Every structure is written in C-alpha cells, then in structure tokens.
C-alpha cells in the first residue's frame, strides 16, 4: 500500500508537498505544520465537468490521406489559416486551399456548403462552384476544396 505525504495549510486547507515551507496556494508559512500520511486508496476522486457539444456535425475525411480529416459544425468556416473557424492541416495540396475557403450551413436536416473565398473553387460531387451559392451536401458527398478532396460523413452528436 502506498502512502501520500503532505502538509495541510492551516490558512486555506491546501495539501502541500511534505517538503514545502510555504503554502503553494496562499503563501502562508507551513514549515511548522506536521507532515501527515494518507493511503493512496483514500485519495478523493474529483469529477471535473466537461462541456460536451451535442450539436450535429459533419466529418470531412481526406481521400488522399486516410485518417486525416476535420469536424465542422453549422456556421463554421473552413480554410488553411487561423482566420477560419476550422483550420485544415497536413493534407496533400494544402497550399491550394484558400485561407478561408468555405462555410458550412444547415437548414432543417439539410447541410450546405458555400464557397466564400475570392479565388479558387469548390467541387461537390463532381460539379465545380466558384460563386457563393449554398450547395446541398449529404452523407457520402465528395467535396473538393480546390485540389484537396474529402468525403462527408454525418456524425450526429459529437463529444469532446
């Protein structure tokens, strides 16, 4: 059985290392406090709440590099720079993608992609788009962001 050794600060109750002279939390002198022992099995477990986004999302998976991809939610922009909400990295032909290339929207159950760059183009299921019209996409659609191709997967709720 392993033991945890600590000094408790009389001012704020923080458990400090047994060699600490001052409390790590409030700075109070704890050198005169007794070193205490506790079984590691007695260590309290603290549940930290994690925010979970349960909104519907799409997963864009690279066709050229299986395993690479990104998740996008309604209203987010996609591009290769941090000006986009979702930054694409590591895919072949990445330089062909605009800094902010496209935006994904949703109306009801239907997803749409919109070309928002001033140059370049998007391709949806083989058809090229250079304007800013919303183009319907679905599970299995093949999206070309300039020269990079991705297949669309609906993910439903996505957890952190």
Image: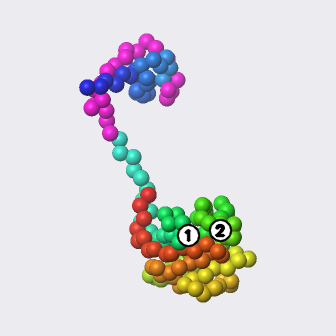
Question: In the image, is residue 66 part of the stretch drawn in magenta?
Answer: no
Quadrant in which residue 84 is drawn:
bottom right
Residue at image x 64%, y 85%? 128
Earlier residue among tags 2 and 1? 1
Dot 1 crowding, Cα within 10 Å, few <14, some 14–19, many 20+:
few
Task: Indicate which disc residue 64 carries.
Answer: 1
Which residue is most to the front?
64
Residue 52 visible (yes or no): yes
Question: In the image, is residue 25 part of the stretch drawn in magenta?
Answer: yes
- Which residue is the site of mark 2? 93
Segment tinted magenta in the rendering:
24-45
Quadrant in which residue 5 is drawn:
top left
Question: In the rendering, at what x and y percent does residue 49 appear?
Answer: 39, 50
Task: Indicate which disc residue 139 carries.
Answer: none
Question: In the rendering, at what x and y percent does residue 56 appear?
Answer: 44, 71
Q: How far apart are marks 2 and 1 (CA)?
A: 10 Å
Dot 2 crowding, Cα within 10 Å, few <14, some 14–19, many 20+:
few
């Amino acid at each position: 059985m392993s033991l945890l050794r600590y000094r408790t600060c009389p001012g704020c109750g923080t458990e400090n290392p047994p060699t600490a002279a001052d409390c790590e939390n409030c700075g109070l002198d704890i050198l005169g406090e007794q070193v205490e022992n506790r079984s590691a099995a007695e260590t309290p477990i603290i549940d930290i709440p994690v925010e979970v986004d349960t909104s519907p999302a799409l997963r864009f998976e690279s066709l050229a590099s299986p395993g690479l991809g990104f998740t996008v939610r309604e209203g987010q922009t996609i591009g290769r720079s941090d000006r986009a909400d979702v930054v694409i990295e590591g895919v072949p032909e990445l330089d062909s993608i605009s800094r902010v290339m496209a935006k994904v929207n949703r109306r009801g159950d239907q997803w749409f992609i919109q070309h928002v760059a001033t140059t370049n183009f998007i391709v949806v299921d083989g058809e090229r788009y250079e304007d800013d019209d919303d183009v319907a996409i679905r599970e299995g659609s093949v999206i070309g962001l300039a020269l990079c191709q991705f297949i669309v997967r609906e993910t439903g709720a996505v957890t952190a």
